[in-house]
């Protein structure tokens, strides 16, 4: 019986990027690991903006495919980033205390109880017990342990500093989660208030306005223009409301599909979001903090500059910064200094470029990148506080105008009749 083709069992990586003519492309490539996948795409002239292992694809360690495990499929999407950060911190603490890796994983599994995390860790533990490296065992679960996480663990294993690297990864994850939470908190409040306002307006239009319209029809008097506009809008919603709702849902689904499939659309939308009057600065600072923290963690782990830039492009969380990372990578590969390449993109602020230049000259680039991240995280804190205090009165004023305008439009005929009487 002939041996099966090795490539049929190789992991598959789904990628998106730009070709030599700067046109967006996407596809699937087979390779033993992420580095080989990127190398193959570079040979084809592709600039990779996003690369991820297909879920359930077998991990490779030293060229050998690890057998798949049902636990991989069972744990998809049911483990939070907070749980992964906590596990990383606990594993680092146990290794720092001198416990062997397998024993540390056993303790973590017992601590996770019957959760999906326990099933995932059991699969990782089995892979390590079979002789796989930790980073290869983690790579079997790409949704929970991304390329950045696995590359850092791989570098730490090669350097013999796993516990200290896990502490750095845990710190990075914790700060990233905190930053994401602050940005979401700043955006969630106005979104929630606007949603409530829309619901209240729809309720008034569909139930309150028709009752007033019936009452006004009994009087037979001519209604003021604002009242007629409100009545016509209410009739439109009542007659075509289901179709309007369906159209909104379809538009939302199509927009989501277009967002996922078209790199240029995401790039244009995120560029626009970074230039918004109020929220743009907050989003820019959050993106720069994430980029600097990720890049500094990679470089501090001993990963080569070009490889670190390539990895951070996939973990930037923002297409604008991902594209800038690839442009910086290409410039550095051609001999440019890091700070000059950053400045040429026009994405990074002058202060970040100057601090990077100082870090390069002093030989402390990772420490300087950490300072850039700390600085921008503090500015995000200040921006969130300022935005919250500013948005509350503005939103309340807008709500007062909208809801109050509806109420006044409904009662204008009543006021007129009262004046006539």
Image (cartoon, grey):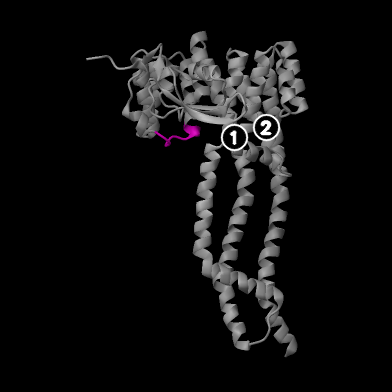
Residues tagged 1 and 2 counted as in contact (Cβ below 8 A): yes
Q: Is residue 79 magenta?
A: yes
Q: Position of residue 277 (x, y in %)?
A: 74, 44
Instruction: Residue at 43%, 28% (x, y): give it.
Output: 54
Foreground of the two, 39 or 162: 39
Residue 159 appears in the figure: yes
Main SS of the magenta segment?
loop
Which residue is under mark 1?
178
Q: Is residue 348 magenta?
A: no
Q: Is residue 411 left or right of residue 95?
A: right
Splitting the image into 4 quarters, where does residue 197 fall?
Answer: bottom right
Quick check: 223 above or below 359? below
Task: Please give the range of residues in magenta.
Answer: 76-83
Q: Is residue 97 left or right of residue 377?
A: left
Instruction: Residue at 62%, 49% (x, y): give it.
Output: 189
Instruction: Residue at 59%, 34% (x, y): give it.
Output: 178
Q: Secondary structure at mark 1?
A: helix
Q: Position of residue 164 (x, y in %)?
A: 54, 16
Spatial CA span between label 1 and label 2: 9 Å
Q: Which mark is residue 134?
A: none
Residue sitting farthest toward the top: 159
Which residue is under mark 2?
377
Q: Secondary structure at mark 2?
A: helix
Splitting the image into 4 quarters, where does residue 279 fall?
Answer: top right
């Amino acid at each position: 019986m002939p041996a099966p083709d090795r490539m049929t069992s190789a992991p598959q990586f789904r990628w998106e990027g730009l070709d030599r003519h700067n046109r967006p492309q996407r596809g699937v490539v087979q390779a033993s690991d992420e580095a080989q996948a990127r190398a193959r795409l570079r040979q084809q002239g592709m600039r990779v903006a996003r690369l991820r292992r297909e879920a359930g694809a077998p991990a490779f360690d030293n060229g050998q495919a690890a057998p798949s495990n049902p636990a991989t499929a069972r744990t998809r999407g049911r483990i939070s980033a907070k749980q992964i950060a906590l596990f990383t911190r606990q594993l680092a603490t146990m290794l720092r205390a001198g416990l062997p890796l397998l024993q540390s994983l056993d303790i973590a599994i017992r601590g996770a109880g019957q959760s999906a995390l326990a099933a995932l860790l059991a699969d990782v533990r089995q892979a390590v017990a079979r002789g796989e490296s930790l980073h290869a065992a983690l790579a079997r679960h790409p949704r929970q342990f991304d390329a950045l996480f696995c590359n850092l663990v791989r570098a730490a294993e090669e350097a013999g500093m796993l516990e200290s690297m896990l502490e750095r990864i845990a710190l990075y994850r914790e700060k990233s989660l905190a930053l994401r939470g602050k940005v979401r908190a700043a955006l969630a409040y106005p979104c929630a208030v606007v949603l409530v306002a829309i619901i209240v307006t729809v309720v008034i239009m569909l139930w309150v306005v028709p009752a007033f319209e019936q009452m006004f029809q009994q009087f037979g008097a001519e209604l003021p223009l604002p009242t007629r506009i409100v009545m016509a809008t209410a009739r439109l919603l009542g007659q075509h409301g289901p179709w309007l709702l369906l159209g909104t849902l379809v538009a939302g689904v199509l927009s989501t599909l277009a967002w996922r499939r078209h790199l240029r659309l995401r790039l244009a939308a995120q560029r626009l979001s970074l230039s918004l009057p109020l929220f743009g600065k907050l989003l820019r600072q959050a993106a720069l903090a994430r980029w600097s923290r990720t890049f500094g963690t990679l470089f501090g782990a001993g990963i080569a500059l070009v490889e670190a830039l390539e990895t951070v492009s996939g973990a930037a969380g923002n297409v604008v910064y991902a594209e800038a990372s690839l442009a910086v990578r290409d410039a550095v590969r051609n001999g440019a200094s890091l700070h000059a390449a950053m400045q040429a993109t026009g994405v990074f602020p002058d202060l970040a470029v100057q601090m990077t230049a100082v870090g390069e000259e002093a030989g402390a680039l990772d420490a300087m990148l950490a300072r850039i991240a700390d600085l921008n995280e503090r500015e995000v804190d200040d921006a969130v506080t300022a935005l919250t205090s500013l948005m509350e009165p503005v939103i309340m004023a807008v709500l007062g105008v909208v809801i109050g305008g509806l109420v006044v439009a409904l009662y204008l005929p009543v006021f007129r009749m009262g004046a006539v009487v």
